[in-house]
Image (cartoon, rainbow, N blue to C red):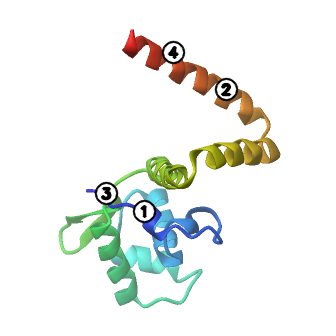
Amino acid sequence: MIKRFANTFRPTKKGLGRAMGDLEKDIMDILWLKEEATGKEVFEELRHSRNAAITTVLTVLDRLINKGMVRKAKGESVYIYSPALTKDEFTDIVSHEVMRGVMDISANSAVASFVDILAETDPKELDRLSKLIDKKKKEIRQKAG
């Protein structure tokens, strides 16, 4: 079961750091890259970029398991950790949760802000958004009629 991630959303952070802690993000980046690793392998990868004890890494891996982000399987003499979802699946879930939360506050403001931000950051995406809206409208009409 994947837990909700928007509860920990941090708008002032960058990238995936908005949806998870810095160490969680670093660990997930390693697992997404390697596809599977022992706790020691994750720890060894992290040693190049941060100072964290192996016990801390194992604790964070257990928390990621509890959040539904990581799977743990028994190997010959160690546990093997792997991502429970891809990076794209994770970003889709977080995006959906955050947008739903913002829409609950004010749908009109959220949509207007989204379009404005999209126009500022990637105007070509406005065309894709317009096509997506048309496609959804068509799907809704087909279901209704």
Residue at the spot x=53%, y=20% of the render?
137
Q: Image quadrant of residue 131?
A: top right
- The residue where tag 3 is placed is 2
Q: Nearer the viewer, residue 27 or 139?
A: 139
Q: Which numbered mark, 3 or 4, is in the foreground of this view? A: 4
Q: Is residue 11 above or below residue 84?
A: below
Q: Amino acid at mark 4?
A: Lys
- The residue where tag 2 is placed is 130
Residue at the spot x=73%, y=33% of the render?
126
| Within-10-Å neighbours for mark 1: few <14, some 14–19, many 20+ | some
The tag on residue 142 is none
The tag on residue 138 is 4
Mark 2 and mark 1 lie on one chain; the one further toward the N terminus is 1
The tag on residue 5 is 1
Q: Residue furthest top?
A: 145
Rounded to the nearest angstrom, the CA distance separating label 2 from label 1 is: 28 Å
Residue at the spot x=77%, y=42% of the render?
122
Give percent across and percent down for residue 21: 50, 75
